[in-house]
Amino acid sequence: MKDKKLIFILSVIIIILIVVSSFMIYDNYQKEQIRIKQQTELDELYLDLDSVSNVLNDKILTISQLGGDIDSLLILKENIEIEKREFRNRAYAQINRLQGKVDGYRELLLAQDEEIEKLKKLNEQLFSENREQKVEINSLNVQIKNINRSNEELEEQIKIAGRLEIKDVQIKAVFTNGSIKINSFKNRSINKLIINFTVLENSLSKIEVLDIYLRIIKPSGQVLYDISKGSGSFTFDRREMFYSTKDEILIDRSEMTYNLEYIKSEELNKGEYQVILYTNNYEIGRGEFIIK
């Protein structure tokens, strides 16, 4: 009787152990299946996130080349990289939240595609406008050059038209006794020469004070020259020339008469003398006198 009871107890214990073992095996199997499923889902999400990151890199490069703003995309890229680094340590409960983020990233990428298309169209429009503007600018530059050339030519014409012109050039010899002779005289007792001339009226002339240079050319071709009497040199037609004397005159556009004096510094030989007047790098008139 005792043996039967013992056998029964052992049988019950064995059955319980079998049931418990079976439950534990099934429970472990279920947990493993859940773990495998979770890992698979996590792997898929990670791959999705990595794919989004790669596509985002392409978008950043494209938008940067098109001249668009990529600051916000760079921040997003950094956030995705952080998500990737921390992804494998997250619990299964975060899968849905991460899935939502991935979906949001995908929507953002679609929005960037639209932005890229807008930038491409804008760049094409700007390229077309720039090409048209370049044509217009080139045409305008040609017009400006032509206008500047015309202005320069006009200014040169006005400058030439505004030059002084003189008439009635007379050379007077003042003798030591105070007598005066004009244009032809003897050397004896000459004290000084007075060159008298009239500046013609010219409404295009500048109102200014001008230096007038007087050159008296001897029959030998040399210039009457004496530094002590006010002689010197000036530049004419990019070369240095000597003058016998110079003076300043006021030009006010009206007709006016002027006198220049030259104090005789040497004996004047017989012959014909040339008198030439210059100002502002051009000749304004000339005359002559004869020493008998």
Image: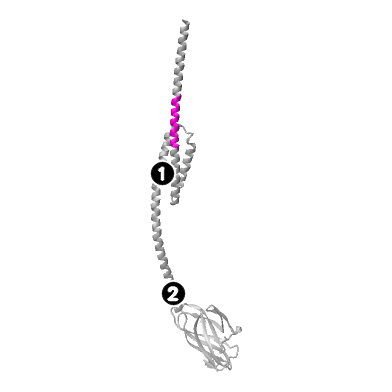
Per the image, label 2 sits on a secondary structure element best described as helix
Q: Which residue has dot 1 on it?
A: 109
Residue 153 figure quarter: bottom left
Instruction: Indicate yes or no whether the magenta region holds residue 32.
Output: yes
Q: Which residues are magenta?
A: 28-46
Q: Position of residue 250 (x, y in %)?
A: 50, 80
Position above or below: 275 against 43? below
Which label belongs to residue 29? Answer: none
Between the residue at mark 1 and the residue at mark 2, the CA separation in whole angstroms equals: 63 Å
Q: Position of residue 45 (x, y in %)?
A: 43, 36
Quadrant the C terminus occupies: bottom right
Q: Earlier in the sequence, mark 1 or mark 2?
A: 1
Q: Is residue 125 left or right of residue 220?
A: left
Position above or below: 171 against 233? below
Residue 243 figure quarter: bottom right
Q: Which residue has dot 2 on it?
A: 153
**Identity of the amino acid at label 1?**
Leu
Q: Residues within 10 Å of mark 1 (few under 14, many from 20)?
A: some
Q: Nearer the viewer, residue 59 or 36?
A: 36
Q: Main secondary structure of the magenta part?
A: helix
Can residue 72 be seen? no
* Of labels 1 and 2, the one closer to you: 1
Judged from this view, the residue extending furthest toward the right is: 228
Instruction: Indicate yes or no whether the magenta region holds residue 5.
Output: no
